[in-house]
Amino acid sequence: MLLADDDVIVRMALGEYLRTCGLKVLEAASGKEAKAVLQSGIDVDVVLSDAQLAGEETGFALAQWIRRYRPTVEVILTSTVLGKAQAASEFCARFPTKAPYDSSGLAARIRALAAERKRRARPPSSTDPVPRKRRRP
């Protein structure tokens, strides 16, 4: 997963916590750095970003870029500012996150998104069961 936050203390603390939960975490201090990681060829399942990243590459801009150029990557936007958190919830409606958040719930959410992405990306094998068509009575 990729953690993008311009607040070094938040990024380090959250990154360390997620690592203790068993997640492999890459860190980026800006939207520009996050895009560089995503363009580098490193496999990233989930991006967790502050909606209010400083500079031109806000978290919202990063999420829009990811949707356009890396549509298989899941995005979680978070914010401590109520208005930004509500907008992030609307943008990423499946998993809205307002900081401060339940850390264990966040780690579980990230694992679920990563597993879902891997399931979608996996080509069907010859040993996968073939779904049967239901007969109508």
Image (spheres, helix red, strand yellow):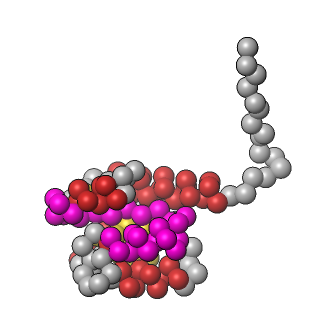
Q: State which quadrant residue 19 falls in.
A: bottom left
Q: State which quadrant residue 76 falls in.
A: bottom left
At x 24%, y 81%, the residue is 54
User: Seen in the image, is 85 located left or right of residue 29?
Assistant: left
User: Seen in the image, is 8 located left or right of residue 45?
Assistant: left
Residue 17 visible? The answer is no
At x 40%, y 85%, the residue is 33
Is 111 contained in the magenta span?
A: no
At x 57%, y 73%, the residue is 43
Q: Nearer the viewer, residue 4 or 85?
A: 85
At x 50%, y 79%, the residue is 38
Please identify the residue farthest to the right as the structure is shown. 126
From this view, report whether residue 71 is shown above or below residue 61. above
Q: State which quadrant residue 52 falls in.
A: bottom left
Residue 56 visible? The answer is yes
Task: State the count of labels.
Answer: 0
Image quadrant holding the C terminus, namely: top right
From this view, report whether residue 47 is shown above or below residue 136. below
> x%, y% of residue 123?
73, 57
> x%, y% of residue 25?
44, 72
Is 61 contained in the magenta span?
A: yes
User: Seen in the image, is 132 located left or right of residue 81?
Assistant: right
Please identify the residue farthest to the top as the structure is shown. 137
From this view, report whether residue 23 is shown above or below residue 86. below
> x%, y% of residue 27?
39, 78
Q: Nearer the viewer, residue 88 or 37?
A: 88
Q: Nearer the viewer, residue 44 or 25?
A: 44
From this view, report whether residue 109 is shown above or below residue 41. above
Q: Nearer the viewer, residue 70 or 37?
A: 70
Residue segment shown in magenta = 60-84
> x%, y% of residue 4?
35, 75
